[in-house]
Image (cartoon, rainbow, N blue to C red):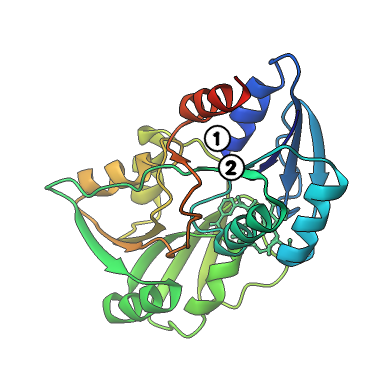
Amino acid sequence: MRVLILGGTREAYELAERLAEIDGLQVISSLAGRTRAPRLPAGEIRTGGFGGAAGLTRYLREERIGYLINATHPFADQISAHAVEAAAASGIKLLRLLRPAWQAAAEDRWIAARDATEAAELCRREGGRILLTLGSGELDAFANVRNAHFVVRMIDVPEQILLHDYRVVSARGPFDLADEMRLLAEHHINLLVAKNSGGDATYAKLEAARRHRLPVIMIERPAIAQEPQAPVVASVEEAIAALRVMLR
Ligand SMILES: NC(=O)c1ccc[n+]([C@@H]2O[C@H](COP(=O)([O-])OP(=O)(O)OC[C@H]3O[C@@H](n4cnc5c(N)ncnc54)[C@H](OP(=O)(O)O)[C@@H]3O)[C@@H](O)[C@H]2O)c1
């Protein structure tokens, strides 16, 4: 049985490592190719887009994939929609591994934003020293915010950043609470902008913001149509259990 994991997340990495140990499974992990030096799990790796839903459908057929697992990031809306379409077109079973969203605690001061554009508008209202924990694709939305100094934390620094006044901190998670408390204090941050990615690896910044009593602009997850028949699981363990049931 050949299993394709659409990856780019910590869970996808862990899942590939675990599935590679199961006899009779051939695991292929697919990465978009955005990160310069990604961590590569056990099993086969392929990199780069498929060419839309049609390209993914073709790949599933040509590579004789028997099971498709979408373990991409909760904000990866295009590839997730393509996975639904391609699985339906090729009659291949699809499993969605999706981390649960973070929930605000009673002491948290979260301000919800629908997307990066709305988050930028909220930043313009607040101003000050703002920590952006977003991907390079979302930064352009903040280009017109001129009353703030941005500290941008990201894994790979893009060649061009259109922000008016900024500093980049290049780092890869997981981050612990002490690191995050220090980052907020060192840069005199008064506002944090985050996407509701969920998971443990980047949660500490929210706890640090809570302790510093800082507001957080939280960008909500995009709505992605799910295949009604496709199970959605929240953890690597649940994904393995679902696959075992299917293999019986
Ligand atoms: N968005 C985030 O905040 C975020 C955060 C951490 C990690 N990631 C990871 O980064 C990757 C790209 O995310 P995105 O938000 O840019 O995705 P996206 O907007 O949903 O996808 C854009 C295009 O990139 C290609 N693509 C995306 N994920 C792919 C994968 N795993 N394998 C092969 N091609 C893929 C597809 O190209 P074609 O149409 O040509 O097939 C897709 O149409 C994903 O693997 C995701 O898990 C994303």
Nearest the viewer among 169 and 233 is 233
Q: Which residue corresponds to the image point at 35% horizontal and 81% vertical from the top-left?
A: 121
Disc 2: which residue: 9
Please give left or right for residue 108 compared with residue 228 in the image: left
Q: Which residue corresponds to the image point at 69% horizontal and 72% vertical from the top-left?
A: 160
Let me know if residue 50 appears in the view: no
Nearest the viewer among 216 and 246 is 246
Nearest the viewer among 61 and 11 is 61
Could you say where residue 195 lies in the image, as x and y percent from the top left? 42, 58
> Label 1: how many residues lie within 10 Å, few (<14), some (14-19) or many (20+)?
many
Q: Does mark 2's beta carbon lie closer than 8 Å to ligand 1?
A: yes
Q: Which residue corresponds to the image point at 22% horizontal and 50% vertical from the top-left?
A: 104
Q: Which amino acid does label 2 sit on?
A: Thr
Do labels 2 and 1 touch, CB within 8 Å?
yes
Q: Which amino acid does label 1 sit on?
A: Glu
Q: Which residue corresponds to the image point at 40% horizontal and 58% vertical from the top-left?
A: 194
> Label 2: how many residues lie within 10 Å, few (<14), some (14-19) or many (20+)?
some
What distance separates the C-alpha of mark 2 from that of mark 1? 5 Å
Residue 41's disc number: none
Residue 11's disc number: 1
